[in-house]
Image (cartoon, helix red, strand yellow):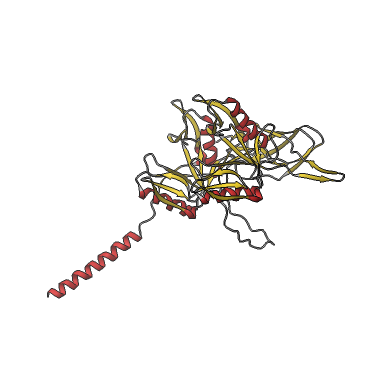
């Protein structure tokens, strides 16, 4: 009798264990998300602060910055984001957005984005705090909450996010994650098997909007509310840095080894800045003989007896720096504000063209500026209706310019060619016909011989009766 009761008891435990396992396996991945309608989102000043709202629900607070609040609305409507999600509320360290239950895809013009690899992203305890990291780059800090850090990693991998983006750094009110557009395989081309991609830590910016500004007594190089460089009391050096950025039309600020990166470099449309800025502080070197070398226990980047960068105990970062130098064929390391220069940049020499009877003539690049306006910028009337965009391209010498018109709906028109026989300004235009209410923008972008993009020409079209 005792034996039978024990058997029944064991059988009951087995059944209970199976039921508990089934219940655990059936629990869905839980996400803290709020749905909203992106077409009804707007920037609104409430009690002196600029907020992003939908009706009576406010989503983001940008304080005194109307510009960043408007940019956040443009980003939401560009991707058609319809869910705002959090990990670790209140005071959530992670904020992300979804589009119909999926990741936002592709870049937004001029966004502040840092790429990372979701496959190597993990939760890691550093100095007692749980952080979400990709190698040496830490992205999110969850303090003592290991569970929230692990949840954030699961979300990143679930949606295959590979860029963390911000509006309004430092202390950005808006954080969002996105992934890159898939690369298409064109008919007639075999499938390429790429090697392991080198990860670069870069922040995009618009060189046309960069300025020197005194903040709390220090001269900083900023774009809007995002500050890039701090020159302390030196207004002269801050203004020189701005001139250099605009001279080369730099549009990405990149780092190796953040925080406190030993290497800082800049790119122009994904390439090395080329040519010489008048009066720059530049040291030439040979990228072919540059290497990572351990000297007195520290990993340095050297060219022969000349050492340029010191990465301490971190061999991996020193090797990455060498790969970057060779990838972009940098052959000058440059500084603004030595010693302890706040700005370091790398460049290469301009190509020398060989022409008949004229060996080694230096080919310089033209300076080009662009503007674009929407006409009308506000419309309320019969639909369909057409918005006209009037633009101008100015070049400082004879050249051939290629340009296009990116739009807020993600479309980009064909590429046009404009020939300048001498320095001057030429007008360009395009139109956009719409049959329903729409608030959007268009830009004028020159893609060759240099890259430069206008400010957004914004418009607001409302059809009669709506």
Could you tell me residue 41's position as x and y percent?
A: 50, 37
Give the residue drawn at x 49%, y 25%.
216
Out of 89 and 325, give the one closest to the viewer. 325
User: Is 125 positioned to the left or the right of 373 in the image?
Assistant: left
Out of 446 and 460, give the one closest to the viewer. 446
Out of 104 and 311, give the one closest to the viewer. 311
378 w.r.t. 301: above or below: above
Please state, as top left, top right, bottom left or bottom right, where the N terminus lies in the image: bottom left
Could you tell me residue 209's position as x and y percent?
A: 60, 32
Give the residue drawn at x 57%, y 45%.
107
Could you tell me residue 196's position as x and y percent?
A: 57, 57
Q: Seen from this angle, which residue lies furthest left?
A: 1
Count of numbered tags = 0
Please state, as top left, top right, bottom left or bottom right, where the C terminus lies in the image: top right
Q: Seen from this angle, which residue lies furthest right?
A: 357
Q: Seen from this angle, which residue lies furthest top?
A: 217
Out of 305 and 204, give the one closest to the viewer. 305
Give the residue drawn at x 55%, y 29%.
231
Could you tell me residue 374's position as x and y percent?
A: 65, 33
Q: Is residue 377 visible?
A: no
281 w.r.t. 135: above or below: above
Q: Is residue 362 visible?
A: yes
User: Is 453 positioned to the left or the right of 100 in the image?
Assistant: right
Which quarter of the figure has residue 211?
A: top right
């Amino acid at each position: 009798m005792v034996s039978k009761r024990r058997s029944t008891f064991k059988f009951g435990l087995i059944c209970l264990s199976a039921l508990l396992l089934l219940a655990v396996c059936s629990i869905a991945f839980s996400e803290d998300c709020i749905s909203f309608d992106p077409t009804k989102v707007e920037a609104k000043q409430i009690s002196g602060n600029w907020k992003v709202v939908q009706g009576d629900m406010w989503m983001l607070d940008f304080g005194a910055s109307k510009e960043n609040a408007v940019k956040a609305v443009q980003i939401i409507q560009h991707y058609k984001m319809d869910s705002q999600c959090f990990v670790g509320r209140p005071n959530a360290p992670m904020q992300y957005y979804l589009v119909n239950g999926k990741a936002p895809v592709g870049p937004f013009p001029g966004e502040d984005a840092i790429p990372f690899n979701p496959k190597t992203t993990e939760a890691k305890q550093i100095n007692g705090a749980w952080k979400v990291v990709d190698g040496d780059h830490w992205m999110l800090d969850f303090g003592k909450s290991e569970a929230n850090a692990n949840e954030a990693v699961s979300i990143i991998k679930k949606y295959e996010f590979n860029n963390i983006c911000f509006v309004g750094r430092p202390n950005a009110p808006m954080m969002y994650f996105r992934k890159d557009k898939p690369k298409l395989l064109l008919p007639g081309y075999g499938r390429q098997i790429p090697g392991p991609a080198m990860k670069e830590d870069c922040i995009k910016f618009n060189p046309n909007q960069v300025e020197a500004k005194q903040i709390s007594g220090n001269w900083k190089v900023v774009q809007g509310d995002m500050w890039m460089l701090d020159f302390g009391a030196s207004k002269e050096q801050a203004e020189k840095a701005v001139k250099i950025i605009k001279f080369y039309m730099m549009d990405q600020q990149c780092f190796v080894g953040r925080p406190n990166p030993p290497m800082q470099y800049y790119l122009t449309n994904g390439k090395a800045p080329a040519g010489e800025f008048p009066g720059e502080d530049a040291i030439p070197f040979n990228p072919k003989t540059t290497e990572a070398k351990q000297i007195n226990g520290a990993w340095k980047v050297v060219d022969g007896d000349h050492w340029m960068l010191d990465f301490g105990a971190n061999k991996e970062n020193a090797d990455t720096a060498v790969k970057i130098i060779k990838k972009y064929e940098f052959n000058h390391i440059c500084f603004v504000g030595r010693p302890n220069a706040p700005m370091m940049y790398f460049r290469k020499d301009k190509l020398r063209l060989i022409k008949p009877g004229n060996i080694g003539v230096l080919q310089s690049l033209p300076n080009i500026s662009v503007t674009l306006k929407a006409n009308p910028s506000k419309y309320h009337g019969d639909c369909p209706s057409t918005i006209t965009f009037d633009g101008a391209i100015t070049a400082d010498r004879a050249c051939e310019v290629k340009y296009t018109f990116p739009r807020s709906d993600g479309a980009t028109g064909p590429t046009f060619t404009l020939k300048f026989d001498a320095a001057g300004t030429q007008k360009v235009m395009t139109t956009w016909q719409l049959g329903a209410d729409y608030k959007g923008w268009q830009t004028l972008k020159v893609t060759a011989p240099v890259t430069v993009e206008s400010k957004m020409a914004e418009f607001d079209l409302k059809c009669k009766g709506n």
